[in-house]
Image: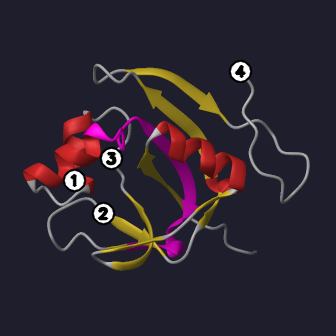
Amino acid sequence: MPRRKSNTTVYHHTNTTGALKILKSGRIRPSNACFGKGTYVTKMGPQQSKNKIAKNNYDGSPNYWQYHKKLGKTDVAMELKMPRAKITSVNETGRDVYKVKGGISTKFIHRVHFRKKDNQNMFASLSKPKRKKKDNPVRLRF
């Protein structure tokens, strides 16, 4: 009997503009950050505070994480269900940071969580509708 792929939940945090570009293009593009080229994710979900996520994702350096928080980089959490084998831990610095080689298709997006700008609470979580065609980008219904 074939083994089922073992999936795990990770989150890609971004701002609203970035989230809309991801949904429109059909993929999360990789970046070239301190652990090399890839798409960076964390197991820290939207239940965590914006400060905690920004400190984790942006090196803990006060000016750096506060700058990215101000840019809204903690306003949207894209919840991804992905095979564990695609995810590499890079948290030797004590941070909860993982890397996926290359970009990530929107087919792995399970939910998108949006936050209010003025506080820590989520105000909307949108689930992905069932897709009809294999390679179409995700379309959210409001």
Residue with the mark numbered 4: 142
Q: Nearer the viewer, mark 3 or mark 4?
A: 4
Residue at 13% from the left image edge and 55% from the top image edge: 60
Work out which quarter of the rendered image holds the C terminus and state it: top right
As displayed, is residue 30 above or below residue 121? below
Instruction: Please report whichever mark, 1 or 3, sits nearer to the chain's N-terminal start.
Output: 3
Q: Quadrant of residue 97?
A: bottom left
Residue at 34% from the left image edge and 21% from the top image edge: 121
Q: Is residue 134 left or right of residue 67?
A: right
Disc 2 on helix, strand or loop? Answer: loop
Residue with the mark numbered 3: 44
Quick check: marks 2 and 1 in contact, CB under 8 Å?
Answer: yes
Quick check: marks 1 and 3 in contact, CB under 8 Å?
Answer: yes
Q: Is residue 55 visible?
A: no
Residue 97 circle label: 2
Q: Nearer the viewer, residue 108 or 70?
A: 70
Q: Is residue 20 left or right of residue 101?
A: right
Q: Nearer the viewer, residue 47 or 20?
A: 20
CA gap between label 3 and label 4 equals 26 Å
As displayed, is residue 122 above or below residue 17? above
* Dot 1 crowding, Cα within 10 Å, few <14, some 14–19, many 20+: many
What amino acid type should be assigned to the residue bearing mark 3? Met
In the rendered image, residue 124, in percent from the top left (x then y), is placed at 52, 22
Residue at 17% from the left image edge and 54% from the top image edge: 64
As displayed, is residue 112 above or below residue 125? below
What amino acid type should be assigned to the residue bearing mark 4? Phe
Segment tinted magenta in the rendering: 70-88
CA gap between label 2 and label 1 equals 7 Å
- Does the stretch in magenta take in 86? yes
Work out which quarter of the rendered image holds the N terminus and state it: bottom right
Instruction: Please report whichever mark, 2 or 3, sits nearer to the chain's N-terminal start.
Output: 3
